[in-house]
Each structure stands twice: as C-alpha cells, then as structure tokens.
C-alpha cells in the first residue's frame, strides 16, 4: 500500500514539474515572440522552480522508507503546485487570463467524448485525482505501519 502511494505521489510530482517543462519549453511559452521578455522570464522561472520542487518531492518520497512525514511533505508540495494552477484558473476574469492561445499555437484540446476541454484542466484534474488517491493510500499505509509498530512494542 505504501509503495503504491509513493508511485501515485511520484506521478503527481511529475505532473506539476516534468510535464510543464516538456510542454512549455518551446515557442508557445519560453520562446514565444509575442510575449514580452519579462513575461518569458517569469514563465521560465516558474517552470524551473516547479522542476526543482519536484526533484525535492521525489527525494522525500523515495528516501523516506516507512516514515510517512517526508512523504506527506511531498504530497503538500503537490497540493501547493496544483492549488496555484486552480487559483490561476479561477482568477482569470480578474487578471484577464485565458486557458488557450489559438494565435500563438496553444489551441483548445478536444476530447472525443466531452468535446472541447482545455488540455491543462484535463491533465491537472487527472493529476489531482491521482494526488488525492495517493494521499488516501498514504494515510491508510501510515496507519498500518503505526499499528504494526505499536503491536511490536
């Protein structure tokens, strides 16, 4: 159970770090000629910060052994990263943001079942479900480890 929680939390960590790096380090974001140099600076800063935070999370997950606390910290890092994304989504009317940029190469993503759906919303909704499942399993696994430890004493 703990191993499966670690695997799910690894996927969650890669979702906010490796995936944005792979999708944003190109002409649609980092090298977008229509963005101001300062906007590109902030994009690179944000993406690379998440890469380094993701590396920290993976370290915490895979060096923790059966100690749940470092794994919970890694899970909270995912909560912070995805929380930032959902805050940006919800605040779009306030700052004039958009999920797609058809002019500069970020078109809407079309799901065969649901029709038009934003790729980031689809990806990050899935990632949050994976994160929640990993946290639930981590909580169950931590309880089992604690019970076994108490029984051994």
Image (tube, rainbow, N blue to C red):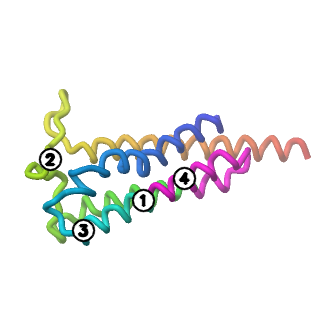
SS at circle 4: helix
> Dot 2 corresponds to which residue?
105
Q: Residue 56 at what x, y percent from top left?
A: 57, 56
Q: Quadrant of residue 92?
A: bottom left
Residue positioned 35% across, 45% down in the render = 22
Q: Is residue 135 left or right of residue 150?
A: left
Of the two numbered discs 4 and 3 on the same chain, state the one appearing first in sequence.
Answer: 3
Query: Considering only vertical position in the picture, is 38 above or below 131?
Result: below
Of the two numbered discs 1 and 2 on the same chain, state the one appearing first in sequence.
Answer: 1
User: Is disc 3 surrounded by few (<14), some (14 to 19) or many (20+) residues within 10 Å?
Assistant: some
User: Is disc 2 surrounded by few (<14), some (14 to 19) or many (20+) residues within 10 Å?
Assistant: few
> Dot 3 corresponds to which residue?
39
Query: Considering only vertical position in the picture, is 46 above or below 1?
Result: below
Residue positioned 67% across, 56% down in the render = 69
Q: Which mark is residue 55?
A: 4
Q: Characterize the magenta stretch by its predominant secondary structure.
A: helix
Q: Is residue 45 left or right of residue 149?
A: left
User: Is disc 1 surrounded by few (<14), some (14 to 19) or many (20+) residues within 10 Å?
Assistant: some
């Amino acid at each position: 159970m703990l191993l499966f929680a670690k695997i799910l939390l690894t996927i969650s960590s890669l979702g906010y770090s490796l995936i944005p790096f792979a999708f944003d380090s190109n002409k649609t974001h980092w090298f977008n000629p229509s963005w101001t140099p300062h906007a590109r600076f902030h994009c690179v800063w944000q993406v690379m910060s998440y890469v380094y935070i993701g590396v920290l999370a993976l370290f915490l997950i895979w060096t923790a052994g059966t100690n749940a606390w470092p794994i919970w910290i890694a899970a909270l890092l995912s909560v912070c990263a995805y929380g930032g994304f959902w805050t940006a989504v919800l605040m779009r009317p306030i700052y004039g943001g958009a999920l797609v940029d058809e002019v500069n190469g970020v078109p809407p993503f079309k799901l065969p079942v649901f029709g038009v759906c934003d790729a980031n919303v689809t990806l990050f909704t899935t990632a949050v479900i994976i994160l929640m499942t990993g946290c639930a399993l981590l909580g169950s696994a931590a309880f089992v480890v604690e019970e076994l430890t108490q029984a051994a004493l």
